[in-house]
Amino acid sequence: MRLCGCILFAALRVISAHIPVILVFVFIALDSLLVGISLFSGSLPTELGMLSGLNHLSLVHCDLITSPLPSELGELSNVFFMNMRSNSFTGTLPTELAKMSLLKELWLNDNLLTGTVPSQPPGLIGLHLDQNNLEGSLPSQLGQLTALEQLRLSQNQFTGKLPSEIGLLSKLYNLELRDNQLTGTLPSELCLLNGNLTSMASGVEMNQYQPYSDLDLANNLLTGDLPTDLGKLTVWEKLDLSNNLFGGAIPSQLGRLTLMEELKLSQNDLVGFIPSELGLLHKTLVSLDLSQNQLTGTLPTELCLMKNTTSLLNISWNILSGIVPPLLCQLNESIFDFDCSDTLCGCDDCICGR
């Protein structure tokens, strides 16, 4: 007689051995296999691919498993959720994973995977490959994953340009590509990522859950001017473009992002004035970081509108001038960061005309 159901090993530090192949045959009709925080060592048995009834596979924090992912995982045609994060898997991503036609969530972040990103199952909703050693260009085929809501590829070694096809992912609300070596300009298609978020924002009125929307491209080598079409990202809550090589002026159209909570443009080569339109974000914005650029001119008084909502306003390491508006001086120095100089002065500890 075959056993079926769910087997769960949770927080079992006492398990310190190879995953026994015999378990595969004992639980051949298993529908869920959940293993967490164990000391399993060695490699995954290829026989896992025989668990044809499996629909949920979770193998998390088993740091002593240092093998490549077996290609036989692609035979798990009924799995819709696979979580193998925080292990020490090596080698490349098996191309056979694309055969898992029912797979919705794939978590392989925080491993030691190498190589490029192959084709993925077409119905994926979440693809989490961050914190690996993946490399090469981001494939344009990502734009074919039209159900994708979360794409997390941060902390890898990806190079090349951002594929414009990402703009086709109308349901995307979480795009994290920080800490790579991506180059080129921001494709204008990226500014079209508003479709599903608009419907989710309206769903809040019906007490439906709205996930946090995050577009994070920090710590890359991206260049060019910031597109004025960034002002179309009206329902995103976080935009982080810091530590790149962007130049030109800050688009005044960013003042349309009235749901924005975090706007980070620091450590670039931005020039020109701080747009007064940024003051329009005062109802929601809690963090505005424009530090370490080449911004000039005076501080717009509209920034004073943020004094009751913001927890960070950083304009330091620029070439600003004039007198700091008195209302900004009321902010704690841990919140408001600016450089007292001969050209920019004001506030008690930065007396003008010293």
Image (tube, rainbow, N blue to C red):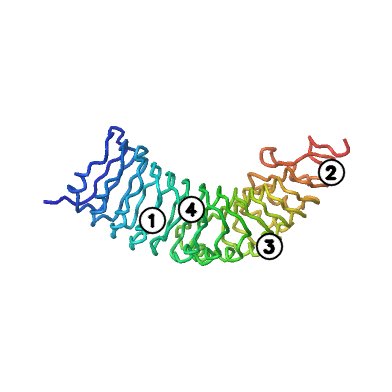
Q: Are marks 1 and 4 in contact (CB under 8 Å)?
A: no
Foreground tag (4 vs 3): 4
* Amino acid carrying mark 2 in the image: Thr
* Badge 1 or badge 3: first in the primary sequence: 1
- Alpha carbon distance from label 1 to label 3: 35 Å
Question: What is the secondary structure assignment of the residue under circle 2?
Answer: loop
* Amino acid carrying mark 3 in the image: Gln
Question: What is the secondary structure assignment of the residue under circle 1?
Answer: strand
Foreground tag (4 vs 2): 4
- Alpha carbon distance from label 3 to label 2: 28 Å
Q: Compared with residue 255, is residue 34 higher up or lower down, i.e. above or below?
A: above
Question: What is the secondary structure assignment of the residue under circle 3?
Answer: helix
Q: Which residue is mark 3?
A: 253
Q: Compared with residue 143, is residue 287 higher up or lower down, i.e. above or below?
A: above
Q: Is residue 1 left or right of residue 336?
A: left
- Alpha carbon distance from label 1 to label 2: 53 Å
Q: Compared with residue 140, is residue 299 higher up or lower down, i.e. above or below?
A: above
Which residue lies most toward the top here?
14
* Badge 1 or badge 2: first in the primary sequence: 1
Foreground tag (1 vs 2): 1
Q: Are marks 3 and 2 in contact (CB under 8 Å)?
A: no
- Alpha carbon distance from label 1 to label 4: 12 Å
Q: Nearer the viewer, residue 330 or 93?
A: 93
Q: Which mark is residue 166?
A: none
Q: Is residue 195 left or right of residue 87?
A: right
Q: Which residue is mark 4?
A: 152
- Alpha carbon distance from label 4 to label 2: 42 Å
Question: What is the secondary structure assignment of the residue under circle 4?
Answer: strand
* Amino acid carrying mark 1 in the image: Glu
Q: Which residue is mark 1?
A: 105
Q: Which residue is mark 2?
A: 343
